Image: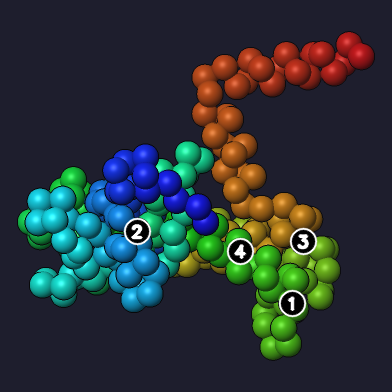
Amino acid sequence: MKIDFEKGDGLVPAIIQDAKTKNVLMLGYMNQEAYQKTIDTKKVTFWSRSRNCLWTKGETSGNFLHLVDIMVDCDNDTLLVKATPDGPTCHTGTDTCWGEENTENPLLFLTELQDFINLRHEQMPEGSYTTKLFKDGINKIAQKVGEEALETVIEATNGTDEHLVYEASDLLYHLTVLLTSKGLRIEQVADELHKRHDPNWDKQRREAKAAGRMK
């Protein structure tokens, strides 16, 4: 990885992102020495412009930033540092230097789940329920989705909210397995919903159908 430290008189901005939540935590600056110490110790280290010295985030507070990955931008002069924080990142005690809470969006787990199911599909480990579903074939998986959909409906009409969420989770999991078996991903469903959110979506769909009939 080539980093152009000379462009900024020896320093490059380093944007710190929580590797799990994807939230931006802070902005610091690194010189070559700070970058190398970060790589060597796996703890994010900066160059303090006010104190004119190296400082490892958390060396006094204990709230270290543990390195996960570093990327450099297209101009080779800005770093994106993915890290796992031990606690609040800001010296004021807040999670981020913008006063935001560093909470994880549960929807991000759907991509993690999709990746996990893809891995099961590739490796097919013995003893895995997901593996069994794939081995049973598309018809059995589709049938299972139908069963879970019915159970979800039953809980919605005659059950409790807790059981509804439980059954809906089963439905979403099996739907993801079904999509994977067809070479698709759950994000494609989200993308389709995003398209439908456009106020002109229904009009565009009707026009597309009309164009298809005219061919």
Residue that lies at the very extreme toward the top in this rendered image: 214
Work out how far the residue at label 3 is from the one at label 4, CA to CA, in angstroms.
Answer: 13 Å
Amino acid found under the numbered disc labelled 3:
Ser
Q: Which mark is residue 160?
A: none
Label 2: which secondary element: helix
Discs 4, 2 touching: Cβ within 8 Å: no
Amino acid found under the numbered disc labelled 4:
Asp
Q: Earlier in the sequence, mark 1 or mark 4?
A: 4
| 136 versus 108 height, above or below | below
Q: Position of residue 52 (x, y in %)?
A: 13, 56
Crowding near the residue tagged with mark 2, few <14, some 14–19, many ≥20 C-alpha atoms within 10 Å: some
Work out how far the residue at label 1 is from the one at label 4, CA to CA, in angstroms.
Answer: 12 Å
Towards the viewer: 17 or 27? 27
Q: Position of residue 131 (x, y in %)?
A: 73, 77
Discs 2, 3 touching: Cβ within 8 Å: no
Crowding near the residue tagged with mark 1, few <14, some 14–19, many ≥20 C-alpha atoms within 10 Å: few
Q: Earlier in the sequence, mark 3 or mark 1?
A: 1
Which residue corresponds to the image point at 29% horizontal and 43% vertical from the top-left? 9
Towards the viewer: 136 or 64? 64
Question: Label 3: which residue?
Answer: 181
Q: Which mark is residue 115?
A: 4
Which residue corresponds to the image point at 60% horizontal and 61% vertical from the top-left? 114
Label 3: which secondary element: helix
The residue mark sitting in front, 3 or 4, is: 4
Question: Label 1: which residue?
Answer: 123
Q: Residue 145 falls in which quadrant of the image?
A: bottom right
Work out how far the residue at label 2 is from the one at label 3, CA to CA, in angstroms.
Answer: 47 Å
Work out how far the residue at label 1 is from the one at label 2, CA to CA, in angstroms.
Answer: 41 Å
Discs 3, 4 touching: Cβ within 8 Å: no
Question: Label 2: which residue?
Answer: 32
Which residue corresponds to the image point at 18% horizontal and 45% vertical from the top-left? 98
